[in-house]
Image (spheres, grey):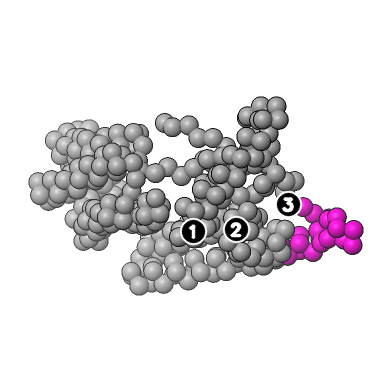
Amino acid sequence: MTSTTLTDRYVDAAMRTVPESQRPDLAAELRGSIDDQIDARVAAGEDRSAAERAVLTELGDPDALAAQYTGRPLYLVGPQHYLDWWRLVTLLLGIVVPLAAFAIALGQALSGADLGGIIGSAVAGAFGVAVNIVFWVTLVFAIVERAGAATADGKTRGLKLRSGWTPDQLPEPRQQGTGVSEVVGGVLAVFAAAAVLLWDRFVGFAPGIPVSFFDPGIWPAGVAYALIVLAIDAVLLVIVHVMRRWTVALAVTDVILTVALVVPVLVLLSQGRLINTAFFPAVLPSGGEDITQIVTVAFGFVFAAIAVWEIVDAIRRARHGARR
């Protein structure tokens, strides 16, 4: 793995909020400015590592610097706390809202609601959670902003969210392409899936009970189809690793492969043809049918979540690859 310097991390962090059309020029300008300041300090006798840290500390928060470069205003609750507000809101929206939607949809599905009721409840619940997150976080920051308002002598009083930005807060640069571990993981996933399916078909996961977990009807065409799609996806990861970047075409291919695998799985689950309906009743004579329904719903949500995540991630990869 290629090591990164504090300067690499700073430039990468600063460019995240800069429009793509401006990133190459601004990144080169910022890096050149940082290097010049470091060289000047080194020429004056400073250690290069200490000089780099001092220069970046003086430049301050890379998001704030990027806003200065692009003329983007940083206010809603006030420029002093805007970045803290924005980071917290986006973090909570990205974590809490999907979890809330998943929990609501799962509860509706287990209660026997139809597809329209599940989707409607999940969307309405997620929207309500999002509204509450934005409202309450904004209210708290507004109170903090006024409690820490500037006095006449220019000093701040009251609450303060951060004691100051330091280079230690820099995130690692986003990886371009795929790492060796991701490629190896993709290849191993094909063999693991094949091993699980073969074991289930010919050995079984319930010792002494000759019933497979997956519906025998998916053999051999369905199993072969799934393994072929997984193998193509592994080849795609190898290609991206060799090219050292994602392109729009490769990202679109990744989305197509995800849809090609997940949609048939969801269809089979909805028709009761993926999980063997005889498995749980055979293993658990009492309540086995209820367990089958619960596991089927859970599988459906897991695969749907994987599909959404892969599609969103592919869009992100395409955007990052296109700007290189």
Q: Which residues are magenta?
A: 140-161
For residue 5, side relative to residue 288 (left or right): right
- The three-letter amino acid code for the residue at tag 3 is Leu
| Mark 1 touches mark 2? (CB < 8 Å) | yes
Helix, strand or loop for the magenta stretch, by majority = loop
Any magenta on residue 57? no
Tell me the amino acid under the disc marked 1.
Gln
Residue at label 3?
161
**Disc 2 residue type?**
Tyr
Give the secondary structure at mark 1. Answer: helix
- Is residue 106 in sight in this rendering? yes
Q: Earlier in the sequence, mark 2 or mark 3?
A: 2
Query: Residue 1 vs residue 54: left or right?
Result: left
Most foreground residue, 310 or 54 = 54
**Of callouts 1 and 2, the N-terminal one:** 1
Q: Earlier in the sequence, mark 1 or mark 3?
A: 1
Residue pushed farthest left? 220
Q: Residues within 10 Å of mark 1 (few under 14, many from 20)?
A: few
Q: Residue at x 75, y 46 (%)?
A: 163
Calculate the distance from the C-alpha at mark 1 to the C-alpha at mark 2.
Answer: 10 Å
Q: Nearer the viewer, residue 310 or 173?
A: 173
Magenta stretch: includes residue 154:
yes
Q: Tell me what residue is drawn at x 67 percent, y 30 percent.
A: 43
Q: What residue is disc 2 on?
A: 69
Pointer 1 residue: 22
